[in-house]
């Protein structure tokens, strides 16, 4: 399936990451800048067709008016399975997210916080990929992503490579701020309404909960939980000089 991606940030992420087949770079005729020159050079280097269109032609073809005079025609990103080799570092499995803007926000957070891989359950995000990529500021393309059929597949993989499963789940939980994250682990976060599936809960090595600043009985949304925990991981890694 051929998709239309909009804007300089998405175009740069697509061509730098080389995660999918790219057909065409479309640039507005009167656009000149260092960034556009860089995109043209990348396209030429990788055998991508470069076309120049009028603003009116781009407006008619694009899904929005916020394209900045740059479009990219590219194929759907292949859904890679978990690799045979051992993954290490901070892995994150996200479940229960249906909105592409939320998934884009989560990908942006994970990439910025140093997450080594995002793990998602298989589903057809193809028509939403341009929205996800734009919402993530290109991070969705740069972040390694692996796709699983079900939770059992992830549990089996983690046991095989001997990496602990840590979950955001309130029952019998330890505060995120009292837990020391190991060098390699997988964090699983579910949706605010349905949470995580029983398979993950039953096989978790540690349940974690976020402390609130006041009495509040309702769960945070997935993107907020992901952000809070991810940057606690950043804080701990900095204290242990893992970014130095």
Image (spheres, rainbow, N blue to C red):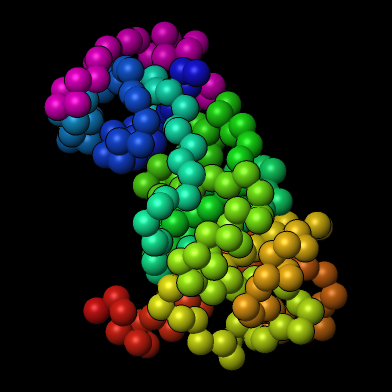
Q: Does the magenta segment cover residue 27?
A: no
Residue 79's x, y, as percent? 49, 37
- In the image, what residue occupies the spot 19% across and 20% down? 47
Number of residue marks? 0
**26 to the left or right of 45:** right
Residue 22 falls in which quadrant of the image?
top left
Q: Does the magenta segment cover residue 57?
A: yes
- In the image, what residue occupies the spot 30% across and 20% down? 25
Residue 183 falls in which quadrant of the image?
bottom left
- In the image, what residue occupies the spot 82% across and 70% down? 218
Residue 44 falls in which quadrant of the image?
top left
Residue 10's x, y, as percent? 39, 36
Position of the C terminus by quadrant: bottom left
Depth check: 202 or 146 in front?
202
Is residue 216 placed above or below 54 in the rendered structure? below
Depth check: 35 or 72 in front?
72
| Residue farthest toward the front in the current orientation of the protein | 160
| Residue farthest toward the right in the current orientation of the protein | 217
**182 to the left or right of 52:** right
Q: Which residues make up the magenta segment? A: 44-64
Residue 74's x, y, as percent? 40, 23
Q: Is residue 12 visible?
A: no
Residue 157's x, y, as percent? 53, 59
Depth check: 79 or 218 in front?
79
**235 to the left or right of 203:** left
Is residue 95 placed above or below 203 in the rendered structure? above
Q: Is residue 206 visible?
A: yes
């Amino acid at each position: 399936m051929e998709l239309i991606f909009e804007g300089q940030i998405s175009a740069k992420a697509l061509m730098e990451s080389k995660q999918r087949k790219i057909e065409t770079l479309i640039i507005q005729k009167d656009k000149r800048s260092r960034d556009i020159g860089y995109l043209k050079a990348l396209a030429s280097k990788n055998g991508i067709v470069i076309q120049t269109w009028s603003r009116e032609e781009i407006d008619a073809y694009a899904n929005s008016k916020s394209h900045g005079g740059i479009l990219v025609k590219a194929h759907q990103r292949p859904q890679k399975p978990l690799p045979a080799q051992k993954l290490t570092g901070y892995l994150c499995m996200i479940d229960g997210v249906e909105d592409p803007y939320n998934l884009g926000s989560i990908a942006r957070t994970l990439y910025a916080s140093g997450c080594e891989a995002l793990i998602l359950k298989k589903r057809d995000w193809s028509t939403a990929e341009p929205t996800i990529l734009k919402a993530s500021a290109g991070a969705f393309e740069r972040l390694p992503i692996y796709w699983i059929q079900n939770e059992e597949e992830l549990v089996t993989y983690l046991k095989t490579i001997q990496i602990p499963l840590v979950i955001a789940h309130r029952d019998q939980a330890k505060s995120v701020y009292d837990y020391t994250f190991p060098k390699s682990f997988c964090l699983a976060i579910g949706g605010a309404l349905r949470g995580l599936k029983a398979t993950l809960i039953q096989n978790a090595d540690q349940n974690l909960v976020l402390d609130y600043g006041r009495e509040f009985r309702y769960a945070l949304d997935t993107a907020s939980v992901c952000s809070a925990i991810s940057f606690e991981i950043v804080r701990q890694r900095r204290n242990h000089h893992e970014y130095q």
